[in-house]
Image (tube, rainbow, N blue to C red):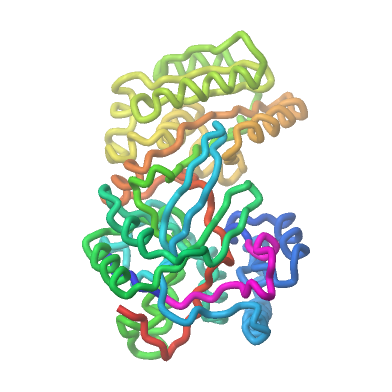
Amino acid sequence: MALIAPFRALRYNSAKIQHLEEVVTPPYDVIDIASHSAFAAKNPYNMIHLDLSKNLGPGQMSETRYQQAKETFAKWQQEEVLVREQEPTIYLYHTEYGLPSGKRLTRKGLLCLVQLAEFAEGIVKPHEKTFSGVTSDRLSLLDTCHAQFSPIFSLYSDAEGRIMTLLEGGRSAEPLCSATDNDGCIHTIWAVTDPAILSQVRELFVERALYIADGHHRYTTALQFRALMRERLGEVASDSPYNHTMMYLCGMEDPGLSVLPTHRLVRMPEAVALDGLVANLGHSFIVEEVTGGSRETLVTEVLARMAENAGATTMFGLYHPQEDRCLLLSLRDGVIDEALGSKQPAALRELDVVVLSDLILDRLLQLDHARCEKDGLVDYYSDPDTALDIAIKEGEANSDRSPLVFLMNPTLVSQVRRVADEGLVMPHKSTYFYPKLLTGLLLNKIVPQEKIPS
């Protein structure tokens, strides 16, 4: 099903750039204004000057902005700051990182080109919605620069690990490059160029589907770019670079693959007492108050108990900062099917994020999605401590409103697969695949006259 191909990546010239940490960035969509300035100040060759941040007003997304990126991209190649590989390559990409628990893991994936397929074909499967306002900016950048600066992160199934075994056996003796990101995660790239191995890997992917984990807007942008080139050229050949996109692929069964939870800070529009919340929630949840320690101790205990039951029972933690009290909420049997059975398919009803958004927020707290969006009532945090600190400060500053922190378990990879297989989409911020891929380790230059090797 999936058609992959090696490619000749552009990468930073080690003779010109000694410290990759000065020039690589996280994906553009997680870079805020302050980080943008910090990256720009690190090094004049930082990727922020090419893979432009999205944190600008519509008036700033002008053609001049994209032309400047194009000129900068050309200049860096002329100066040989960016150099292109000589032969088609599939790149082995390892990420060594630590979880909040302190456990160390290594996620193993590969970077290659993937032939584009419309979502309706069932070859590349999404689990999130995309928004045209985001893709229009990325499309202008891609069309102007003719390069993909940031890879899409996708998953595939390979329970026996045959693909990674082949690539590990054929990788270069020394890594091409390595960089440590701001979280201390170590990203390392090796080259695999043996034609026999590349051919075997390509054949193994033909029988597999790909599931987008992170980068839905980047993939949608690539589809739009192909459509744009079809309008201009009349057709786009199957081996055209316009018919491919750069993608990082990781096995669903990889022991180093991690999905972290995204906790919710919910701003109740009025002051609410925890006892009132308990009475409201008690019909749908078994409510247990956790006591006997500091805020940090309470939250740690709740998160630990949630983790013990992950995948078995839907559980939430609820912290009320104005009362310094913490609850453990366990969904009662049959409640979600009765409440949402006529509105949501089973694959979505089993998601904690859907139980929170559709049952707790919408039905029990009377905060529908449109209101939450309009009034900014929900914020999302991967770090529970950050969510707690902000909630406490907001609670102290606004006695007439109550911030509540809902502590979440991560969405399971098996749930992502089921939702995608059924052609459904998850709520916003349902998955956080960690660590993020780095932008700038490898770039895909689109040369119209070239043909993608098979």
Q: Work out whether residue 258 or residue 372 is closer to the camera in this orientation and state it.
A: 258
Q: Is 167 placed left or right of 139 in the picture?
A: left
Q: Is residue 247 among the parts visible in the rendering?
A: no
Residue 117, image quadrant? bottom left
Q: Is residue 294 among the parts visible in the rendering?
A: yes
Mainly helix, strand or loop, the magenta region?
Answer: loop
| Magenta residue span | 7-24
Residue 386, image quadrant? top right
Whole-percent x and y of residue 176? 53, 67
Residue at 74% x, 30% y is: 393
Residue at 65% x, 29% y is: 388
| Magenta-span inclusion, residue 88 | no
The residue most toward the top is 292
Could you tell me which quadrant the C terminus lies in? bottom left
Residue at 61% x, 8% y is: 292
Q: Work out whether residue 132 or residue 271 is closer to the camera in this orientation and state it.
A: 132
Question: Image height check: is 269 above or below 420?
Answer: above
| Magenta-span inclusion, residue 23 | yes
Residue at 27% x, 63% y is: 205
